[in-house]
Amino acid sequence: MFALKTMGTLGSIAQILGMLVAFAVILAAAYFVSKYLGKYALKTRENSNIRVIETSRIAVDKYLQIIEAGGKYLLIGISKSNISLISELSADQVKDFTVKEMEKFSFKEFFDKAKSKEK
């Protein structure tokens, strides 16, 4: 009788460990797939003639976007059923954050700054 209870407990522990291992494998796979897809998306964007510089939400389903198309900067309004050109902007009116500037971001530096502010 005691042996059956021990096997039941060991079986439960084995099931829990198996689920934890499966969960870890799924998390690792999701991490690597998202990292690969992110790099792929950046490469396809680099070879494009159209680039979204900035998007700002102003209401539900209504956005303003600054885009670069063919070397020109355009401010467009986007709603659920319409896209309209609002203005053409000069290059000095647009603050452009390139991918290279974003790659310089270090989470460790950000975390250290946030940690030092708490004290």
Image (cartoon, grey):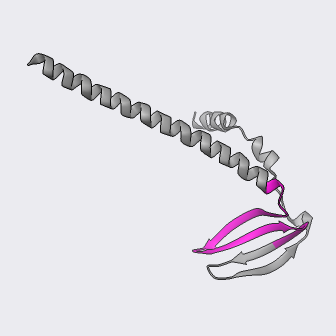
Kindly give the residue lying farthest to the top in the view shown: 3
**As displayed, is residue 45 above or below residue 116?**
below
Q: In this view, does 75 lie to the left or right of 79?
A: right
Camera-side residue of 56 and 85? 85
Residue sitting at 66 percent across and 48 percent down? 37
Q: How many marks?
A: 0
Camera-side residue of 105 and 116? 105
Residue 5 image position (x, y, % from top left): 14, 22
**As displayed, is residue 92 above or below residue 37?**
below
Camera-side residue of 103 and 51? 51
Residue 65 image position (x, y, % from top left): 74, 69
Q: Is residue 58 left or right of residue 95?
A: left
Is residue 87 highlighted in magenta?
Answer: no
Q: Main secondary structure of the magenta part?
A: strand
Residue sitting at 77 percent across and 54 percent down? 44
**As displayed, is residue 103 above or below residue 87?**
above
Question: Which picture quadrant has residue 96?
Answer: bottom right
Quadrant in the picture for the C terminus: top right
Q: In this view, does 57 lie to the left or right of 85?
A: left
Residue sitting at 18 percent across and 19 percent down? 6
Question: Which picture quadrant has residue 45?
Answer: bottom right
Quadrant in the picture for the N terminus: top left
Residue 103 image position (x, y, % from top left): 76, 43
Residue 23 image position (x, y, % from top left): 44, 37
Residue sitting at 63 percent across and 33 percent down? 116
- Residue range in magenta is 45-74
Is residue 58 highlighted in magenta?
Answer: yes
